[in-house]
Image: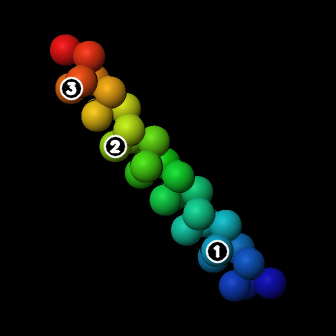
Amino acid sequence: MLVRVTFLVAASIAAYAIRQSNLQKGRTLSS
């Protein structure tokens, strides 16, 4: 139970970080 919650939190944080890095890449490429 606890492991599953921790995994979900880690997955959401990883997805957020990847999304932020992708946005920054697109911003630098477009400009």
Residue at 58% from the left image edge and 57% from the top image edge: 12
Q: Which amino acid, mark 1?
A: Phe
Q: Which amino acid, mark 2?
A: Ser
> Toward the viewer: 29 or 14?
29
Image position of 3 (left or right of 26): right
Image position of 7 (left or right of 24): right
Residue underneath mark 1: 7
Q: Is 19 drawn above or below residue 28 in the view shown? A: below
- In the rendered image, the quadrant that contains the C terminus is top left
Residue underneath mark 2: 21
Residue at 34% from the left image edge and 43% from the top image edge: 21
Mark 1: secondary structure: helix
Q: CA distance from mark 1 to mark 3?
A: 32 Å
Q: CA distance from mark 3 to mark 2?
A: 11 Å
Q: How is the image coloured?
A: rainbow
In the displayed image of the protein, which residue is found farthest to the right? Answer: 1
Q: Residues within 10 Å of mark 2 (few under 14, many from 20)?
A: few
Give the image location of residue 20, x and y in percent: 38, 40
Give the image location of residue 3, x and y in percent: 69, 85
**CB of mark 1 within 8 Å of CB of mark 2?**
no
Mark 1 or 3: in front is 3
Q: Residues within 10 Å of mark 1 (few under 14, many from 20)?
A: few
Mark 2: secondary structure: helix
- Residue 28, label in figure: 3
Q: Which amino acid, mark 3?
A: Thr
First in sequence, mark 3 or 2: give its number.
2
Residue at 72% from the left image edge and 84% from the top image edge: 2
